[in-house]
Image (cartoon, rainbow, N blue to C red):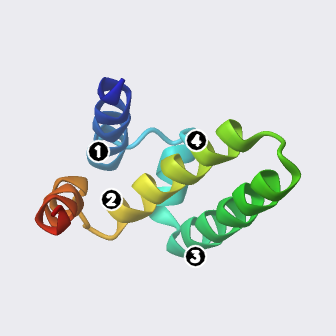
Amino acid sequence: MFETLEQLMITIRNRKNSPIDSSYTNKLLNHKNLSVAKVKEEIGELIDAVEKDTNKIHEAADVMYHLMVYLEANNIKIEDVMSELKKRQK
C-alpha cells in the first residue's frame, strides 16, 4: 500500500531532476504560486466532499499528491516529515 506513495515521491523527484515540459508535476514544481493555490483548492474540495459525503477518496488523493509536490518544490523531504511524525509517537 505505501509503495504507491513511495513511487509517487520517486516520480515527483524524477520530474524535478529531469523535467518534462508537458508534465503537470513540473508545472507545479516550477510555479510556486500555482502549487500553493492547488494545495489550498484541493483541501477545500476535500472538506466539501467530506461534508457532502461524496468523492472523499478522490479528493483526499488530490490533496496528498499536491501536498507532496508542494513539499518537494520547497525542499521539504517527506522522509524528514515522516521522522518528525515518528518522534511524536507515544
Assign the C terminus to one quadrant of the image. bottom left
Give the secondary structure at mark 2: helix
Q: Residues within 10 Å of mark 4 (few under 14, many from 20)?
A: few
The residue drawn where x is 28% and y is 35% is 10
Assign the N terminus to one quadrant of the image. top left
The residue drawn where x is 16% and y is 62% is 80
Report the mark closest to the observer, 4 or 3: 4
Q: Earlier in the sequence, mark 1 or mark 4?
A: 1
Q: Residue furthest front?
A: 90
Q: Earlier in the sequence, mark 3 or mark 2?
A: 3
Q: CA distance from mark 4 to mark 2?
A: 17 Å
Q: CA distance from mark 1 to mark 4?
A: 18 Å
Q: Are marks 2 and 1 in contact (CB under 8 Å)?
A: yes
Give the secondary structure at mark 1: helix
Q: Residues within 10 Å of mark 2 (few under 14, many from 20)?
A: some
Q: Is residue 73 left or right of residue 55?
A: left
Q: Are marks 4 and 2 in contact (CB under 8 Å)?
A: no
Q: Quadrant of residue 61?
A: top right
Residue denoted by label 2 = 72
Report the mark closest to the observer, 1 or 4: 4
Report the mark closest to the observer, 3 or 2: 2
The amino acid type, in three-letter code, at marker 2 is: Glu
Residue denoted by label 3 = 33
- Residue 13's disc is 1
The amino acid type, in three-letter code, at marker 4 is: Ala
Q: Residue furthest right?
A: 52
Q: Which one is in front, 70 or 21?
A: 70
Give the secondary structure at mark 4: helix
Q: Earlier in the sequence, mark 3 or mark 1?
A: 1
Q: Earlier in the sequence, mark 4 or mark 3?
A: 3
The residue drawn where x is 61% and y is 47% is 60
